[in-house]
Amino acid sequence: MTDVTVENATPARAKKGSGTLRHILWVLRENPVTGLSFAMFAGLLISALIGPSIVPYDPLATDASATLQPPSAAHWFGTDNLGRDVFSRVIVATRLDLVISVAAVALSFVFGSVLGAIAGYRGGWIDTVLSRVLDTIMAFPLFVLAMGIVAALGNSVANIIYATAIINIPFYARLVRAEVNIRRDAGFTQAAKLAGNSDTRVLALHIFPNALPPMMVQVSLNLGWAILNAAGLSFIGLGVRPPTPEWGIMVAEGANYIVSGEWWLALFPGLWLMLAVFTFNLMGDGLRDIVDPRRRS
Amino acid sequence: MLSIKDLQVAFRTRKGEVSAVRGISFELARGERLGIVGESGSGKSVTSYALMRILDANGRIKAGDAVYSGIDLRKAAERDMRDLRGREISMIFQNPRAALNPIRKVGHQIEDVLRQHARATRQDARQKAIAALEAVKIRDAEARYDAYPFELSGGMCQRVVCAIALACDPKLMIMDEPTTGLDITTQKAVMDLVDELVTARGMSSILITHDLGLASEYCDRIVVMKDGQIVEEGAPQLLLSAPQHPYTRKLVDATPRRGVTIRELLPQEERRPLAPHVVAETPLLEVRNLTKTYQGKSGPVHAVRDISFTIREGQSVGLVGESGCGKSTTSAMLVRLLDPTSGQLLYRGEDLAQMPAADFARNPLRGKIQMVFQDATDSLNPRHTSRQSIAEPLKRMTDLRGAALAARVEELASVTGLPEHLLDRFPHQLSGGQKARVGIARAIATEPDFLILDEPTAALDVSIQAVALNLLADLRARLGMSYLFVSHDLNVVRMLCDHVIVMKGGEIVDAGPVEQVMDSPSHPYTRELLEAAPQVPIPTAAA
Amino acid sequence: GAGDTLVAVTAQTINSLDLHRTGTNRASYAVAINCYDRLVTFGTKEAPGGGLSYDYATLEPELAESWTISDDGMTITFTLKEASFQDGSPVTAEDVKWSFDRAVTVGGFPTVQMKAGGLERPEQFEAVDAKTFVVKLDRPSKLSLPDLAVPVPFIINATLAKANATADDPWAMEYLHKNTIGSGAYKVTRWDPGQQVVYERNEAWVGGPVPSYARVIMREVPSAATQRALVERGDVQVAFDIPDKDAAELAEKLTVYSTPVENCIHALCLNTNFEPFQDANVRKAIAAIVPYEAIFKAAAYGRGAPLWGGSAEITDTAWPRKSPYDTDLATAQEFMAASAYPDGFETTLSISTDLASWMEPAALLIQEAVAKIGITVQLDKIPGANWRTAALVEKRLPMHLENFGGWLNTPDYYFFWAYQKDHLFNSSNYFNEEVEQLTNETLHMAMDDPEYAPKIKRMFEIAFEDLPRIPLYQPALNVAVNGASGYEFWFHRQLDIRSLSPASA
Amino acid sequence: MGARGTAIGLRIAQAIPVLFGVIVISFLLTRALPGDPAAQFAGAMATEESIEQVRTSLGLDKPLVTQFGLYLGQLARGDLGQSVSTGQPVIEELASRLPASLELTLFALILSCAVAIPLGVLAATRPGSWVDQLCRLLVTAGVSLPTFFTGIVLVYVFYYLLGIAPSPLGRLDFIYLDPPHVTGFFLIDAALAGDWETWFGALKQLILPGLTLALFTLAPIARMTRAAMLSALSADYVRTARAAGLAPRKVLYGYAFRNALLPVVTTLGMVFSFVLGANVLVEKVFAWPGIGSYAVEALVVSDYAAVQGFVLSMALLFVLLNLIIDLAYSVIDPRFGTSAK
Ligand SMILES: Nc1ncnc2c1ncn2[C@@H]1O[C@H](COP(=O)(O)OP(=O)(O)OP(=O)(O)O)[C@@H](O)[C@H]1O
Ligand SMILES: Nc1ncnc2c1ncn2[C@@H]1O[C@H](COP(=O)(O)OP(=O)(O)OP(=O)(O)O)[C@@H](O)[C@H]1O
Ligand SMILES: [Mg+2]
Ligand SMILES: [Mg+2]
C-alpha cells in the first residue's frame, strides 16, 4: 500500500512542477504583449547580470580626445562630456537601476504586506491606527517626501531605496488590507481554522497568498515607478553619487545637452529607462496570471 | 407564437469553439406556460439569450430558426430586435438585486423602458412607472418610486424587476431562475404574483429553472434539457410520473420530496441498501442558553437569542429556518469559530464555551468537531489543490507525513468518491459536486464525532445533491458521527435527520422528531415553511 | 513697445530687494546695483574676453560729485551731486550717513564687507551739511575707496525709510525688503519672488547717462537649456550667467561675453588637517597629476583662463596667475615616491551639489588621474545647504574643490580670505607664519608702495610651494546677448542693466 | 442626506489625526535636513556672532520641543511663518503659487481624462482586440517616460525646433499682463475680465507642461476606466437593460458608464494628488511658478517654514480632495454613507 502511494505521489508531484512551468509558458504565449514584456525583462536581466563584463568600454574611463561624440560604430550611443562611452554606461547602469527598483519594491512589499495583513485581519483599533498612519503618509506629496528623506539621510543608493520604499508602503498596505478584509470571513479561512491553523498561519498561508495576484500588478507598476522616482531624484540633484552610471542621472544631465544638439546623451539612457519602466508596467498582467492558479486550465 | 427549430449556439473561447446549444426545437403557443429544466450548464440560459439576441460578444447563433409572431429573430435587424425586447418579449433574471442598476432610482429604471418603447412621455412617465409598481403589488408604490435598489429587500427587488419586464405589456415573458437567492416564503409569493399577472394578461411565459417542483407547479408544459439538447418534453404530470428519457428519470428521482427515502433519490441501479445508523442515548453536545449579539453599526443585532437543545451521539439534527434567522451563527459557535455572548456548550460534559475560539485551534478537540460549508467554492482555498486542502487538517492535527499522509488523503478521496486524478486540480477546475466531495473529505479527515453541515448542498444540482446526501448518510453510518444539518430545504431535512429544530429571528420556535414536526406541524411558522416549499406532484416511485 | 523693453533671463532667484537684509542672496545684489546709487563707482575698460569691464583702477563719481582725501589718508570728504530720490526728495548727506550707519550696524555680510574697507562704526560717518559727507578712517587703506564702490554702501532715502521704520525694526528692513527707495537708474515696479523682477527707468537719474531701456524684465529660468533656447531664438535679449558649454557653442551664433572673473580661482584644496596632505610631496604629486587641460576643456569648455604651466619665476604681481605645475605623470610619480605614501592612500574628494556643473567633471577627471599615482578617491556630493558648513566653517573636507573670488581686486585681499588661518575661505586649514605676516602688511598698503610688490611676490612663492590650494583655472562669467549691446562685466557678477542698449541703436 | 452628512462629517473628523501626523512628521523631517539654516542665511561672509544672531532670530536655539510648541502656536494663529530664503510670509507665497500648480494640474487632468476615458471605454467594449492592445501599449508608454524628459523633449521640438509653442517661461509670456487677481487661475481670471488675448496667452503656456503631465496620467485613468467598464458591462443590470430593449447608447452611458465612474473617480483623486506632488519636475523644466518648485528650493536650503508650510498645505489639499471625491461619490452613488455596497 505504502509503496503504491509513493509511486503515485512522485509522478503526481513531478507533474505538478511541470504544470507550473507549462502554466507560465501558457500565460506568456496567450497574450503577445505579455510575452513581449517578459522577453524584454529577460533582456534587462541579462544585461544587468553580464552587462558589465561585455561592454566595450570602461563606463568610468574618460577620454579627453573624444568628448561629446555623436553615435558611431566605435561608440554606438556616442560619448558624453568627459568622453565616456554612453552605451557602456547605459548597459552597466542596468544593474544599479534594477537593484534600486527591485530592492525598494521588495521592502515596501514586505512591510506593506505585513502592516496591511494585520490591519485587515485584526480590524478594530489596530486597523484604525494603521489606516490613519498610512493616510498620513499618503497625505504627503510623495515625491517631495522622498526628496526630504533623501535630503535628510544623504543621497546614497541605500537611502534612495529606503525613501522609495517608504512612499510605496501605503499602496501595498491598503491593497493587502482590502484583500485580506474580504477574505477574513471567507469559507476557506474558516475551513483553515477548523483544520487547526492558528490565526497567524491562516493569515500568512491561506489568506495572504490570495492577495498576491492583484499585488503583482501593483508590484509591476511600482518597479517602474521606483526607477522613475530615482530618476526624478537625480534630476533635482539627489541621485546616486557620481561617477556611478545611473539612467536617471544620465538623462537628467543629458537633458542639458539636448538644446545644444547632443541629443544622444539624454535620448539613449532615457530610452532605456523608458524601456525598463515600460517592460515592468506591461509585465503586471502576466505576473498576476502566473501567480493566480485560477488562471490555470 | 414562438417556434424554434434546430437552434444552435456556439461560443468562441480560448480553447476553441464551445457549442452551448446544439439543435433544439420547441414551440410555444399563445398563453402557454413553458418550463425549461435541466442541470447547470445545459444551455437553458443561453437558449433564452439567443432568443433575445443578447448573447455575449463571443457567442453567436450558428444555425436554426427562431420565429416569433412571424419575425425571424435570427435575421431581424438590431433596431427591430431592440424594439422587440421589453415590448414583445421580456426577461427576468436570477439575483434580482444585481439585475437592477444600483445607482439609479427604481422608478427611473422603469421609466427608461417605458420611454424607450414610447409607452410614456416625459409628463406621464412617472405616473405610469408608479402604476407599473402598483401592478406588482409593491406596497406604497409612490414612495418606492424614489427608492434605490439597495433600499429594497430581495423580494421587493424581484417585484421591481417584474415591473420593468411587464411595464410595456409584453406578449412573452422569459424567467431565468427568477427565485434563486430568495427565501422560500418570498419565493412562493413572487412566483404566485408573476403567475397571476401572466395569466391575467394572457401572456405566454417560459420559466427556466432546475427545480422540478417549481416547474411543475407553474407550467403547463416542461422541456428537459441536457448538454444543449432537449431530451424530453411534455405536461408536468405526465413527464414526472412517467419519465421516458433516462436523464429525465434521474432528474425526477433525484428531486427530494415527501415520502421517499434518501436512497430513492439515486438512480435505481445505484441504490444499495443503507446501513442504519445508531442513535445512542448519551448526549454528545448540549447547548444551553446560547446567545450571540453582534455590535452592529445601528445598535446590537441579536443573531441568536437564548437557544438550548441537545444532540445525542449518532444523532442527526436538522436546523431549518429562513435566511438570517441565525442558522450560520449558531453553527459557527458550535464549531468554535465564533465566541458566544453567553451560554454553555457542553461537549461530552466539558464546556467548550469557556475556551476562546481563537485558541481552540490548538485544542485536541479541534479535530473532533468539524464542519462542511454552505458554499463549496468559497470554502476551498483557490490556491490549494484538492490534495492540499484534504491534507491540511491532517498535517496540522495528526502526525501523518509523507507517504502515510498521501495514503490517507487518497483513502479519504475514495471514501468520498472523488476520483484520484482530481486530487491535483485546483478548485476552479472542479465541478460543484466534486468540490463538495473535497469539502466533505476534508471535514471527515480527522474522524470527527460531530459534523456540522451548513447547507452543504445548497449550491448543487439535484442529481449531485442526491449523491452528496447519500454519501453523508453512508459516512454517518460508517463513522458513527453526529450531524447538525443546516438547511432551508425541508424535504432534505426530512430524509436525512432524526430530529429537527426550527428557528426564526434567532430563536427556536419549534423542535422535535422529524416526523412529528413535519407531518403534523404545530407551530404556525413551521406550517408556513412547509406550505411554501414547492411539492413535486409525483406519486412515490413505486418501483 | 518692444524696443524699449529688455528681457533678460538668469537661473538665479532674487530673494530680497534689500542687500542689507540677513539672508539676502547674491542674485539680489543686482537690485542694489540697478536701483540705488553709491557715492563712487568704478570706471570702464575693455574686458580681456571682449566687451566691457569695470576698471578697478579708476574710480568715478556716482552720487558724489567729487571727493578729497586728507593728507594722512584718514579722512575722505565727499561733495554730493544735485540728485533726487525717486520720490522727488533731494539726496542729502544725512541720507548717506543713515545708509552707511545701516550697513555697518545690521550685521552679517554688509557689515563684514564694510569692515574690509575699514568702515566699522557709525561714528566714522558724518553729514557736515546737506551736500558734504565725511568718512573718517582708523588707518589709511587702499581698500577704503574701492569698498565704497561695491554694492553694499548704497544710498537709501532715509526720510522715507524712517517713516516706515518701527521700534522693532529701526532700519526699516521690512519696508526695504519689498521696496526700492533709492536714487538709482531704475526702480523695481514688480517683484514676483521666484519668477521675475521688473525694473522701470528713473528718468531723473544723475549717477550716469540715462539708460536706453525704459523697462527691463529679469526672468528666472532655472533650466539652462531653456535659457539657451530663449536667447538663441531671440525671445530674450540677455541670458545671464550661462554655463560654459552653452557659452562656447552660442558664441558661434550670437554675441557671448565670457569674462574671466577677476580675483577668482577654481581650485583643488588639500586640507592640511589630514595626514597625507601634510606631506608637501603628496601635494606636489597631486599638483603634477591633475589633468588641467582636460578639466579646462570639460568643466569650462575653454572659457576663462588657464592657471597652469606658468614659469617658475615670479616677475609681477598679477593675480590670479599660472602656477608652475603642469600635468606630468613622471614628476608626479617622483614626488609620490619621495613622499611618506609611496603606495598611495585613500581619501574623499568632496563637491557641492550646487556647483556640480563644473565641480563634477573636474572631480571625475581628478579622481581618474590621481588613481594613476595610487590615490584612491571616493567622490562625495555634499548638498548645497551643507557645503558652507562642511567646507568653510568646519573645514572638515580632506580634498575638495573650491571657488572663492574676491570682490576687491588685489592679491592681498585674496590671500586675506583664502590663505590666512581660520579665515572663511581657507578651507585647507592652511597656516604659514610668513604668509600671515605678509598678508597683514600688504592688505591696506597702497599698491604703488615700493615694498608692496616684493612682498606680494614672496606670498605667491610660498603659496605655490606649499600648495594648500591647487589652482585649476580662472572661471569666466558668461553672458549671451542677442539684440542688445553695452554689456559690462562687474566683479560682483551681477547684471548691470544700466549700460545696456538695443543693438541697433 | 442624513447618512451622507454624517459620513462626510466623519471623514472630516478622521482627517484631524492625519493633519496632526503630517505636522509632526514635516517638523521632524525639516529638522533632520542637513545644513545649518542659520549659517546658510547669515550669508557666505558671516561671522560666528552674526550666525548666532540669525539662529536666535529664527528661534533655532531653543530645544526641539519648545520649537514645536511655538510652531503649533503659530499654526493656531493661522501663521505659517516666514520663508527665510525668499523673505516672504509662507502663506502669501503659497497663496500665489498654489493656483499656478492647481491650474496646471487640473488642466493636465482634464486633458488626460478627455483622452483616457474614451480610450478606456473603447478598449472595454472591444476587450482583447488590437484596439485594446494598442491602447494598452500607448498609455503604458506614456507613463514610462520620466516627466522631466518628456518636458524637455517637447520644449526642444515644439519651441526650439518648430517654434510653434511659446517660450517655456512660466504662466504668461511677458508681452501680456497678469489678469486681475480673482481666483489666481489665469484662465478663469482672464475670462472673468473678458481679456481673451491674455486668456489665449495663458492657454498657450499651459499646453506643453499640461501635455507632459497628461501623458503621464493617461495610463492609470485609461486602465481603470477599462477595468471598471468591463466589470460594469458584464454586470447583471446591463444584461437586464439590454433585455429590456434600451438603446445601446443608453446602456453604455446611462447604465454601465455611470457605475464605472465610481472607481474612476477614486483613481482620479489619487492621480491628482500624485501629480500635484510630482509637479516639481515639470515646474522646473517650464519655469512654472508653482508650489512644487518652491518646495524644492526650500528643501535644498533647509528653509524650515517654507517646507513645513508646503507640506501642510498639500496635506490640507489632500484632505480637501478626498472630501471632494466623497462628495462626488455621494452624488453618483446613492449608497454612499450606508453600509450597503
Ligand atoms: N460567454 C460564454 N463564453 C463561453 N461559454 C459560455 C458563455 N456563456 C455560456 N457558456 C457556456 O454555455 C453552456 C450553457 O450555459 P447556460 O448558462 O445556458 O447554462 P444553464 O443551463 O443556464 O445553467 P445554470 O443552471 O447554471 O444557469 C455552459 O457550458 C457555459 O459554459
Ligand atoms: N458579523 C456580524 N455582525 C452583525 N450582524 C451579523 C453578523 N453576522 C451575522 N449577523 C446577523 O445575524 C443574523 C443571523 O445571521 P446568520 O448568518 O446566522 O443567518 P442564517 O440563518 O445562516 O442565514 P442564511 O440562510 O442566509 O445563511 C442576521 O440578521 C445577520 O444579519
Ligand atoms: Mg442559467
Ligand atoms: Mg447561513
Image (spheres, rainbow, N blue to C red):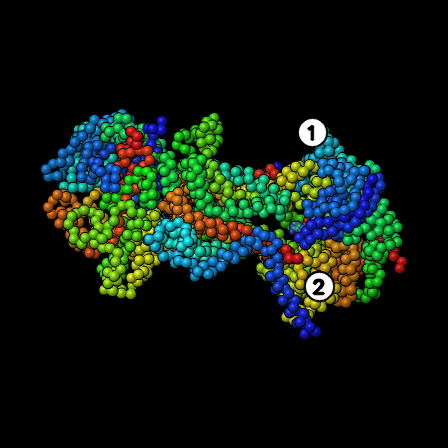
Toward which corner of the image does residue A8 lie, by quadrant? bottom right
Decide if residue A119 is on the left or right side of residue C414.
right
Q: Position of residue C139 (x, y in %)?
A: 14, 42
Determine the chain carrying the residue at label 1.
B
Quadrant housing the N terminus of chain D: top right
Toward which corner of the image does residue C97 lie, by quadrant? top left
Question: In this view of the protein, which residue sits in the foreground, C2 or C177?
Answer: C2
**Mark 2 or mark 1, whichever is nearer to me:** 1
**Residue B520 sits above or below residue C339 on the image:** above
In the rendered image, which residue does mark 2 sit on? Answer: B441
Spatial CA distance of label 2 from label 1 is 61 Å
In the rendered image, which residue does mark 1 sit on? Answer: B122
Decide if residue C251 is on the left or right side of residue D188.
left
**What amino acid is at disc 1?**
Arg
Q: Position of residue B455 (x, y in %)?
A: 73, 55
Q: What is the crowding at mark 1: few (fewer than 14 residues within 10 Å), some, or many (at least 20)?
A: few
Residue at x 22% of width, y 40% of height: C114
Looking at the rendered structure, the secondary structure element under dot 2 is helix
Quadrant housing the C terminus of chain D: top right
Toward which corner of the image does residue A191 lie, by quadrant? bottom right
Residue at x 32% of width, y 54% of height: C365
Residue at x 36% of width, y 45% of height: D301
Decide if residue C258 is on the left or right side of residue D5.
left
**What amino acid is at disc 2?**
Ala
Question: In this view of the protein, which residue sits in the foreground, D54 or A32?
Answer: A32
